[in-house]
Amino acid sequence: MSQELWTSVDRYLAGLLLPADPALDAALNASTAAGLPEIAVSPTQGKLLMMLAQIVGARSILEMGTLGGYSTLWLARGLPINGKLITLEFDPKHAAVATANIARAGFAGIVEIRVGKALETLPEIAAEGHGPFDFIFIDADKGNYPGYLEWAIKLSRQGTLIVVDNVVREGAVIDASSNDLAVLGVRRMNEMMGGDRRLTATAIQTVGSKGYDGFMIAVVRSED
Ligand code: SAH
Ligand code: DHB
Ligand code: MG
């Protein structure tokens, strides 16, 4: 089992299930050209996000961690035309690339990018009366995942779907003695998922073009 094989199988599956897509391809190309790290979700994972939004009938989505807007575009495609997506990004350069990618794909009217540290923009979003959101995707800096999950629950209603990226990290997540802030953040968040009676949660390990990682998926059962 190897990265090479996982990538080949991902390519095989994408060839069957994902027709060529100029807007998404352009978003990835522009992100690479601008020097952004190549850490967006894979195409098959992006389609999963779109389908999950459709399955829950999402009309409003909150995303933490925009990068160049690749996952944002998949999520936006899962919304109805009068839907709304707010995505949070700390790095103004990433936000600028995402803004162009989202406009090119025709989603400028649906997607709003908030630039700043998510732990600072989340209280603003709440204070402005946004939410509860139907679907929340957590994918920003891993060290702050515990705080992001708390905010996600605050901005949820019964039935809200919460999806968290990168919860396995090539297996590093089982290292209880890790000093890596990302691992510590993900581990603490995973523990919250298991211990919070407001959530029904499970996790899926994944391999593919983005290596070995995983998603946590939770449904909010009640707000208290
Ligand atoms: N969701 C994207 C990938 C996000 S990568 C996709 O799959 O296409 C993580 C992003 O979180 C990076 O762009 C990084 O700049 C951003 N980020 C890092 N720290 C942050 C913070 N404190 N608040 C908001 N975003 C942050
Ligand atoms: C990293 C962040 C991500 O969101 C991801 O999907 C993969 C890697 C990172 O910061 O290394
Ligand atoms: Mg990620």
Image (cartoon, rainbow, N blue to C red):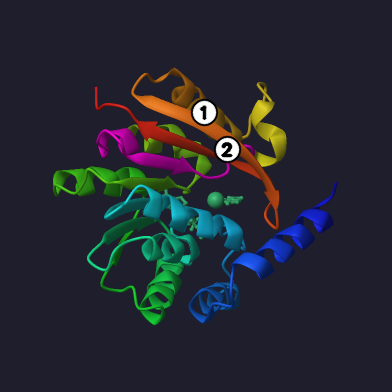
Q: Which residue is painted at 65% across and 21% down in the image?
A: 176
User: Is-magenta flag for residue 160?
Assistant: yes
Residue 190 marker: 1
Q: Which residue is painted at 26% across and 60% down in the image?
A: 84
**Segment tinted magenta in the rendering:** 151-168
Q: What amino acid is at disc 2?
A: Val
Pointers 1 and 2 in contact (CB under 8 A)? yes
| Quadrant in which the C terminus is drawn | top left
Q: Residues within 10 Å of mark 2 (few under 14, many from 20)?
A: many
Work out whether mark 1 precedes mark 2 in sequence or the reverse, and give the earlier one: 2
Q: Residues within 10 Å of mark 1 (few under 14, many from 20)?
A: many
In this view, the residue in front, 209 or 114, is 209
Residue ID for mark 2: 167
Mark 1: secondary structure = helix
Q: What amino acid is at disc 1?
A: Asn
Total numbered labels placed on residues in the image? 2
User: Is-magenta flag for residue 62?
Assistant: no
**175 w.r.t. 50: above or below:** above
Q: Which residue is painted at 39% across and 73% down in the image?
A: 102
